[in-house]
């Protein structure tokens, strides 16, 4: 995917520097594009990622004082979640087999599962540059920097109130994003 997007990007804008931005799974895609651009000798001074969890981030086991609660949280709950997801995926695949469009609600789930599968197979390399990371306050990840800290030199993070799917809702949130991106762009260009 990153290679296909890069071909289009380089056709439109054949010289850098390049400033990429990605939201959610798009952040992973932008990250890989930035790495490939750097490998090809192009400059990518920084990357903006909006509520993107690294594919390397594996949530730790949640140990509780109560043994049975630990079993429920770490074994039974994930098993039930996986079972529900498998059933939903089976329903989506049945629509595909019948050559019928997947209804909207299950389609969102299906797309999300496909993105998770792609991210799970992705092995990112280190990006030589900075990341401007926006994280929602209700992001459930236990990693402060959403798992990106081992893959970049420097991370500047801003928290935005709300949930993942609400990050662009409301004038205040979009103004914060715009202001911080412009500020960081000015800072990075001032270093040259």
Image (cartoon, helix red, strand yellow):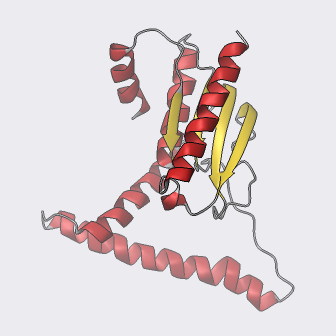
Q: 2 or 76, which is in the foreground?
A: 2
Q: Say how many tags the image has.
A: 0
* Image position, residue 145 (x, y; %): 72, 48
Residue at 68% in and 52% down? 159
Residue at 28% in and 74% down? 91
Viewed as shown, does residue 12 lie left or right of 77? left
- Up the image or down, 40 lies above or below 68; here it is above
Position of the N terminus, as image quadrant, is top left
* Image position, residue 180 (x, y; %): 64, 37
Residue 153 seen anywhere in this rendered image of the structure: yes
Q: 40 or 172, which is in the foreground?
A: 172
Residue 147 seen anywhere in this rendered image of the structure: no
* Image position, residue 152 (x, y; %): 71, 32
- Up the image or down, 67 lies above or below 89; here it is below
Residue at 65% in and 21% down? 186
Viewed as shown, does residue 92 lie left or right of 72? left
Q: 103 or 182, which is in the foreground?
A: 182
Viewed as shown, does residue 82 lie left or right of 137? left
Q: Where on the picture, by quarter, is residue 181? A: top right
């Amino acid at each position: 995917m990153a290679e296909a997007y890069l071909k289009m990007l380089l056709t439109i804008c054949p010289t850098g520097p390049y400033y990429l931005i990605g939201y959610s799974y798009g952040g992973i895609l932008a990250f890989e594009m930035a790495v490939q651009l750097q490998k090809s000798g192009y400059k990518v001074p920084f990357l903006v990622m909006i509520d993107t969890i690294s594919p390397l981030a594996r949530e730790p086991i949640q140990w509780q004082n109560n043994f049975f609660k630990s079993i429920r949280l770490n074994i039974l709950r994930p098993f039930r979640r996986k079972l529900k997801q498998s059933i939903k995926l089976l329903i989506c695949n049945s629509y595909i087999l019948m050559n019928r469009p997947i209804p909207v609600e299950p389609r969102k789930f299906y797309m999300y599962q496909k993105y998770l599968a792609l991210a799970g197979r992705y092995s990112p390399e280190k990006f030589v540059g900075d990341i401007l990371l926006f994280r929602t306050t209700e992001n459930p990840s236990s990693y402060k920097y959403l798992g990106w800290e081992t893959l970049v030199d420097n991370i500047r993070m801003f928290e935005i109130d709300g949930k993942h799917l609400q990050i662009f809702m409301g004038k205040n949130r979009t103004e914060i994003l715009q202001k911080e991106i412009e500020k960081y762009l000015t800072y990075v260009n001032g270093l040259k």
